Image: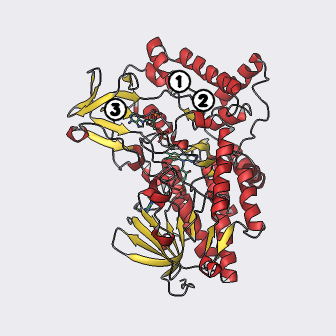
Amino acid sequence: LETTKTKGADFDAVVVGAGFGGLYSVYKLRNEQGLNVKAYDSAGDVGGTWFWNRYPGALSDTESFVYRYSFSGELLQKGRWKTRYLTQPEILAYMNEVADTYDLRRSYEFNTRVTAARFDEETGLWHVTTDKGQTVTAKYLITGLGLLSATNLPKFKGIDSFKGQILHTGAWPEGIDLKGKRVGIIGTGSTGTQVITATAPIAKHLTVFQRSPQYVVPIGNTPQDEATIAAQKASYDDIWKQVKSSAVAFGFEESTIPAETATPEERERVFEAAWQRGGGFYFMFGTFCDIATSQIANDAAADFIKKKIGQIVKDPETARKLTPTDLYAKRPLCGNDYYGVYNRPNVTLADVKADPIAEFTPTGIRLASGAEHELDVVIFATGFDAVDGNYTRMDLRGRGGVTMRDKWKDGPLGYLGMMETDFPNLFMILGPNGPFTNLPPSIETQVEWFSDTIKMMEAKGLKSIEPTEAARDEWVALCRTIADMTLFPKADSWIFGANIPGKKNAVMFYLAGLGNYRAAIDAVKDGGYETMIFDREKAST
Ligand code: FAD
Ligand code: NA7
């Protein structure tokens, strides 16, 4: 077993989280560098997102061959899947296999929430406190808290009086059976569309409470035969090279052809082919190169989907309610015959923008118009306090006792999506202003970057690292400039923190793609970390 190298500390590093990010951090720092690592997760076991999100229909919308780690050829060749996308149980089984293969579980304490972490300027150590009342010290603090992990449970009047069951998709208990029940679902985002299509065939009645209509293209979750999978496994070197130099990292070639200058016939042909192929990111980024940036191209894509809604949904009034009127500029959604669900006799669509939820009653939900919906179960598919939610829910303090909550009161800030000023030796996985992509390759990119940084610090005997304020500000400004080149800021969504009442609208992502992101962070490392302050105590005396 490892011994602690840092003088006076319990551990060299504390890792919080047992999702893709946390597990890989333990592997890199403990297995590869021999550091003594202590890890925590409030969940009962490994998996992160895929531990918590066990709702019916939970599925990745990244294709199976690239929703996984790339670092281990052995793991890649062992990969098993049957369909184009992975179900939640398949991903959870994969995460368990990773933990077993690399003996990662022994560093973890599960069912343990980190409630506070404080940087002690005297000792240069992090003091990390858990809900079990334990405090440990370590030189490095790695937070893989998840960017879509802190659940958003909107408050509704009368909710405590409801006699039925209330569930959030992101904290789904085992053993829930929706068969034959009267189910209400609030929310029609990525999660909502999945749980809606899975619940409609089994519920006695399903009422969907929709605030914003969505653009949803088919997912195309076709079976994959052994030959296809074998070919993918044989090409992994090329696949990862392509993924890591691409923008969205979804494993397809992004289009270089603008829709703006394409003929109506060409647009129709390309959109129809993408509709038949399936995939949300493919529809937005694989068809034409300017859907996220050009109003004309965006309208063309939006009009195509709107036309499909009109063709699929039989009742014109329901079709009207389901048809979005805003831009096609949120995280692109895909589903399994999503709009077709509304043709079922056991499904009702309640437009809660027009007729808001007034209150929960003991037997269901009452709308402002007085309309009552009787329900046994209400599912909140209302999303997450994205990106910074799990940071501001924790008492996280840097130099001079400054809290992250305070620092981020006008919106979260991050340097390279991993670091923040006054928080030395804190490395955030998928922290603010990081890449917006298929996430495992971005997570690996970040973990590899800070593992290299830590290795360099240990080799040189450096005590602490933190970014300069100028570098952080410049990175944040760059993220703003990039975001403003797209249409995304013009649509309200979690990508900009617009889904949580009272949350400041901020640019939370670096939207220039994984290839550019990798080049940017490598330039910092290869350029000798000129944007960082090392051993600030010494530097300022
Ligand atoms: P997570 O997997 O979220 O893990 C974070 C862990 O930290 C959690 O287990 C949590 O319990 C723990 N934690 C947080 N705070 C504390 C604390 N204070 N103390 C102790 N433990 C704590 N991404 C894609 O790229 N493609 C997809 O198709 C896709 N589908 C998704 C579908 C759903 C339903 C959801 C919710 C997300 C999806 N995502 C998808 C995003 C997904 O979150 C990432 O792909 C990835 O799983 C994130 O890994 P992570 O390790 O960074 O965080
Ligand atoms: P999202 O995309 O934030 O969707 C949440 C949905 O819940 C969305 O339709 C919201 O409507 C709706 N919502 C939120 N609050 C309310 C209230 N108070 N009343 C009614 N409806 C509400 O979260 P998801 O979980 O679907 O997806 C998040 C990511 O996780 C996704 O991109 C995947 O990567 C996995 P709104 O649109 O705000 O009007």
Q: Residues within 10 Å of mark 1 (few under 14, many from 20)?
A: some
User: Mark 1 or 3 closer to N-term?
Assistant: 3
Q: Is residue 221 visible?
A: no
Q: Position of residue 93 (x, y in %)?
A: 51, 56
User: Mark 3 or 2 closer to N-term?
Assistant: 3
Q: Which residue is located at x 48 percent, y 56 percent?
A: 48
Q: Is residue 443 left or right of residue 112?
A: right
Q: Residues within 10 Å of mark 3 (few under 14, many from 20)?
A: many
Q: Position of residue 272 (x, y in %)?
A: 68, 23
For label 2, being within 8 Å of ligand 2 is answered no
For label 1, being within 8 Å of ligand 2 is answered no
What type is the residue that disc 2 sits on?
Answer: Tyr
Q: Which residue is located at x 46 percent, y 19 percent?
A: 321
**Which residue in the protein does label 1 denote?**
324
Q: Which mark is residue 328?
A: 2
Q: Residues within 10 Å of mark 2 (few under 14, many from 20)?
A: many
Q: Label 1, label 2: how many angstroms apart (C-alpha)? A: 8 Å
Residue mark closest to the camera, 3 vs 2: 2
Disc 1 + disc 3, Cβ < 8 Å: no
Q: Label 1, label 3: how many angstroms apart (C-alpha)? A: 21 Å
Residue mark closest to the camera, 1 vs 3: 1
Image quadrant in which you'd find residue 506 = top right
**Which residue in the protein does label 3 denote?**
184
Circle 2: element type: loop
Q: Position of residue 361 (x, y in %)?
A: 22, 32
Circle 3: element type: strand
In this rendering, the count of numbered labels is 3
Q: Which mark is residue 316?
A: none
Disc 1 + disc 2, Cβ < 8 Å: yes
Direction bottom: furthest residue: 7
